[in-house]
Image (tube, rainbow, N blue to C red):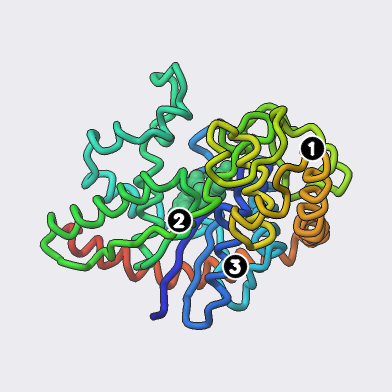
């Protein structure tokens, strides 16, 4: 069955291995199924929910587009565009925010994490961010949304918002209720410095993540310094309990090699970390170095990147403006 795929990545700099293994790698696989129609969005409206330096933001929008392309998203097969170029996203977000309930948004754990202790000082955009995300998805009648594990709750909310809109305006199936596509294994890559914390672009320590722009030397240095424990590598999956760092590193290796965790464990069982780290470093370099070089090459060609985003937003706008027009009719505008 052909799928309509939509996903988004924020242009907030430092795209990392978690973004790649948890999301972008999956985007490429979905794109390469001939029947699928794929749309990948640089969600710049989402990025400004926290303060951004305008010049940096512009650079990061191009860098995110370059990363998509460097990872294998082909602009002749998929639509690549940035959200702020298609005004229907903002309009739909407003309409949907009048359908969404405060009680639903109050349950969003990502807001609680990102807002931290001082919730009163967080932007209203940060709070209503999942409604904008729902607008992104619903404007394109997306059937499937590939994301990392941390976006699961936002997708459940998107489903609730779609159903509420359809009920309120008595239009069954007008907004399509999308299915999340979250990988069973390796959908949450953890920090190299703390196996209990997600690998994140906002972590203060650059040693906590492998950036998609890292060089071979940076990768090998970060893997060397990655936290481990004092035991040898385990013999089976059960023995990974309470060894989050070992589990994460073995998971990264397995995901890079497209194999399951058991295979990686068999390859390294009872060995010490230093041998394994060398192999891990090689596997990372093999995957990331070509991506890193291609991102840098593409960043030198701003004209090309801008032309991809412009052509992509034209295509996206055709789809989204039709849907928002229908939404406005239904609302009574
Ligand atoms: P963001 O950079 O927050 O816009 O995230 C882009 C995509 O990467 C989303 O689908 C996230 O779920 C995914 N992602 C971000 N961090 C991780 C991580 N540490 N592990 C797995 N997936 C991640
Ligand atoms: N909120 C997502 C994140 O931070 C990014 C995003 C925005 C998204 N709109 C989306 C993901 C629509 C999937 C579909 O990772």
Kind of element beneath mark 1: helix
Instruction: Check disc 1 and report the residue beneath it.
Output: 222
Residue 201 in the image: above or below residue 28: above
Callouts 3 and 1 close, C-beta under 8 Å: no
Q: Residue 45, can we see it?
A: no
Kind of element beneath mark 3: helix
**Residue 296 coordinates in the image, percent (x, y):** 81, 55
Q: Residue furthest right?
A: 217
Instruction: Check disc 2 and report the residue beneath it.
Output: 182
Query: Horizontally, is 299 left or right of 172 in the view?
Result: right
Q: Nearer the viewer, mark 3 or mark 1?
A: 1
Q: CA distance from mark 2 to mark 1?
A: 27 Å
Kind of element beneath mark 2: loop
Q: Quadrant of the N terminus?
A: bottom left
**In the image, what residue occupies the spot 53% across and 78% down?**
33
**Residue 161 coordinates in the image, percent (x, y):** 25, 51
Instruction: Check disc 3 and report the residue beneath it.
Output: 28
**In the image, what residue occupies the spot 82% across and 53% down?**
282
Q: Nearer the viewer, mark 3 or mark 2?
A: 2
**Residue 333 coordinates in the image, percent (x, y):** 20, 58
**Observer-nearest residue: 173 or 122?**
173
**Observer-nearest residue: 117 or 193?**
193
């Amino acid at each position: 069955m052909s799928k309509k795929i939509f996903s988004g990545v924020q242009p907030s700099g430092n795209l990392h291995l978690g973004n790649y293994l948890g999301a972008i790698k999956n985007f490429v696989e979905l794109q390469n199924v001939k029947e699928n129609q794929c749309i990948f969005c640089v969600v710049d409206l989402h990025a400004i929910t926290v303060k951004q330096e305008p010049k940096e933001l512009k650079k990061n929008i191009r860098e995110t587009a370059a990363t998509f392309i460097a990872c294998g998203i082909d602009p002749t097969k998929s639509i690549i565009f940035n959200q702020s170029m298609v005004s229907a996203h903002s309009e739909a977000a407003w309409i949907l925010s009048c359908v969404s309930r405060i009680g639903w948004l109050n349950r969003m754990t990502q807001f609680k994490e990102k807002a931290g202790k001082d919730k009163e000082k967080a932007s209203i955009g940060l709070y209503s961010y999942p409604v904008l995300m729902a607008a992104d998805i619903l404007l394109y009648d997306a059937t499937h949304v590939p994301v990392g594990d941390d976006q699961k709750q936002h997708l459940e909310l998107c489903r609730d918002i779609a159903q509420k809109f359809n009920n309120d305006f008595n239009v069954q199936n007008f907004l399509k209720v999308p299915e999340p596509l979250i990988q069973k294994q390796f959908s949450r890559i953890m920090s190299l410095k703390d196996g209990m914390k997600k690998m994140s672009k906002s972590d203060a320590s650059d040693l906590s993540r492998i950036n998609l722009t890292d060089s071979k030397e940076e990768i090998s240095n970060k893997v060397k310094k990655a936290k481990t424990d004092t035991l040898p590598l385990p013999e089976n999956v059960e023995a990974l309990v309470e060894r989050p760092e070992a589990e994460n590193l073995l998971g990264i290796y397995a995901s890079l090699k497209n194999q399951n965790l058991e295979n990686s464990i068999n390859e390294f069982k009872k060995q010490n970390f230093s041998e394994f780290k060398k192999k891990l470093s090689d596997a990372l370099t093999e995957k990331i170095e070509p991506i890193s070089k291609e991102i840098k090459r593409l960043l030198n060609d701003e004209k090309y990147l801008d032309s991809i985003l412009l052509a992509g937003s034209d295509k996206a706008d055709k789809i989204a403006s039709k849907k928002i027009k229908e939404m406005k009719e239904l609302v009574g505008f």
